[in-house]
Image (cartoon, rainbow, N blue to C red):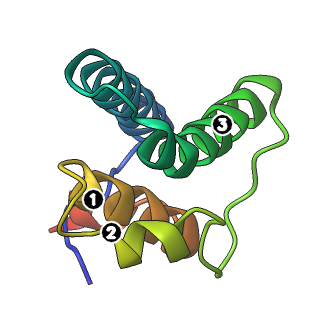
């Protein structure tokens, strides 16, 4: 368990936004550095799309915390050593499962 998940909705939204930016930049680097990045992009693009859908649900008010892993975590867990943003994805997932860390303000 990580102890640095966000305390506020705004912080959580910022984490999701940061993950979207990092994955987008990672894809751009792969496209620039590799002649044929298809396989890697084939894994990363669905992850990016899933995060964008989460972000959209946050914007339209339909997002709900739920005590189950986000859909992208199976892939993220398998590739944890290859993704520079895997810790960020883990914190987003933990927050999705456990909710905001509002108790941290009480300490």
Percent x, y of residue 17: 43, 27
**Does 104 sit above or below residue 88?**
below
Q: Secondary structure at mark 2?
A: loop
Q: Residue, x 38% and y 78% (percent of image)? A: 78
Left or right relative to 20: residue 82: left
Q: Secondary structure at mark 3?
A: helix
Q: Which residue is mark 2?
A: 79
Q: Does label 2 or label 3 sit earlier along the sequence?
A: 3
Few, some or many residues within 10 Å of mark 2 (<14, 14–19, 20+): few
Query: Who is closer to the viewer here, 46 or 103?
Result: 46
Evaluate if marks 2 and 1 touch, with contact meaning CB atoms under 8 Å apart.
Answer: yes
Q: Which residue is mark 1?
A: 86
Q: Residue, x 72% and y 36% (percent of image)? A: 53
Q: Does label 2 or label 1 sit earlier along the sequence?
A: 2
Percent x, y of residue 86: 27, 59
Q: Does label 3 or label 1 sit earlier along the sequence?
A: 3
**Does 38 sit above or below residue 76?**
above
Q: Which residue is mark 3?
A: 49
Q: Secondary structure at mark 1?
A: helix
Percent x, y of residue 69: 59, 76
Disc 2 from disc 1: Cα separation: 8 Å
């Amino acid at each position: 368990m990580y102890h640095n998940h966000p305390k506020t909705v705004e912080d959580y939204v910022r984490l999701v936004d940061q993950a979207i930016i990092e994955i987008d930049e990672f894809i751009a680097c792969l496209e620039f550095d590799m002649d044929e990045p298809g396989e890697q992009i084939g894994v990363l693009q669905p992850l990016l799309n899933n995060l964008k859908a989460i972000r959209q649900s946050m914007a339209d008010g339909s997002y709900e915390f739920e005590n189950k892993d986000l859909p992208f975590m199976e892939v993220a867990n398998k590739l944890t050593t290859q993704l520079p943003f895997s810790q960020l994805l883990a914190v987003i997932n933990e927050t999705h499962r456990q909710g905001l860390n509002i108790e941290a303000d009480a300490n």
